[in-house]
Image (cartoon, rainbow, N blue to C red):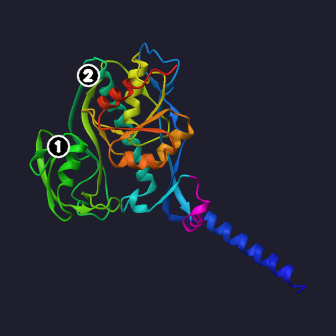
Amino acid sequence: MRRLPGLLATLGAVLLVVVGVLWLARSSDYLISPDRAKPLAQRVTVPNEKPSKDGGIYYVDVLVRRASLLERLLPFVRPDGSELVPKEALLAPGTSDADRVRQSRRQMTRSEQVAAAVALKQAGYKVKATPDGVTVDQVAGDVPATGKLRPTDVIVRANGTPVRTPGDLRRIVGALKPGDPVTLGLREGTKERPVTVRTIRSPSEPGRTVIGIAVSQAANIKLPVKVNIDLGDVGGPSAGLAFALDVLEELGRDVDHGHKVAATGELELDGSVAPIGGAEQKAIGARRAGVDVLLVPAGDNARDARRGADGLRIIPVDSFQQALRALATLPRKT
């Protein structure tokens, strides 16, 4: 019996070492965790801006990192509100974390340009913004499109139908069955080069047919005034809706009606709002920031956001114009 305390101490020390190793060792999975929503007022600047004195537009982001082996094995040690997702949901096969970061930054740059164009047009400015296809940002390493498509290719047609926006391509490919071929028209100067690739089943979205590429809006955008948007190291396209709302607010439009308004959604040049990832975590981040409402893409995103809302009002929207109409119905907050 006198040996028992020593044995327990030894076992405790071994357990601590094992826990430490499992905490430091990285798994192949990722954790998506809520990040508190942040105001855009100091991040967006326009000429002669008229910032509001109350309320404000907020953007919401998520924190993404590799999960430790301990977090993978024991859900209760994960950050509150986080979700464990497989590597395939974030990284296309054959790509790295560095590739993901580069793609995310390219998407952010394009998102800023599109948001500024949509907002200025809504404000009555003459904006030259012509969607002219989708740019291939990334090609997965082991899909039929590998070797046939490459980053910077611009897709302007799919199965004979013009492709002007990412939404056009999603609709055309989504109507096919996995394994069906799709013929893409790639812009080369003033000509088109046809390329036929076989579609696949999405590894992260059951029931969805994809090509296995990441794309962004290709467009010729010329703004009549300079709009500067700077979120630092934040990447991705999902802040587009929030950007456009805040540009209007900075121009003197009473968008928020005195409310703290958070928004997430990829914005396209025609004003439509496309789905984003991490809707539940973004709702948690918005709630923690004390905002009054959260605008999210309608459909699955709205359903997911409600799981993390816990009393926060969720407003589903399909377009920028619908978002403005929904906010206009809010009673003035004083």
Which residue is identified by label 1?
163
Q: Which region of the structure is painted magenta?
A: 69-80
Q: Residues within 10 Å of mark 1 (few under 14, many from 20)?
A: many
Give the amino acid at mark 1.
Val
Residue 75 spot, x, y in % from top left: 57, 63
Give me the residue at 41% from left, 56% from top: 90
The numbered mark, 1 or 2, whose residue comes first in the sequence reads: 2
Above/below status of 155 relative to 15? above
Residue 148 spot, x, y in % from top left: 21, 58
Tell me the number on the disc at residue 234. none
In the current view of this chain or complex, which residue is farthest to the right? Answer: 2
Query: SS of the residue at dot 2?
Result: loop
Residue 180 spot, x, y in % from top left: 16, 63
* Quarter of the image where the N terminus is located: bottom right
Is residue 188 shown left or right of residue 102? left
Which residue is identified by label 2?
127
Q: Do the residues labelled 1 and 2 touch (CB within 8 Å)?
A: no
Give the amino acid at mark 2.
Val
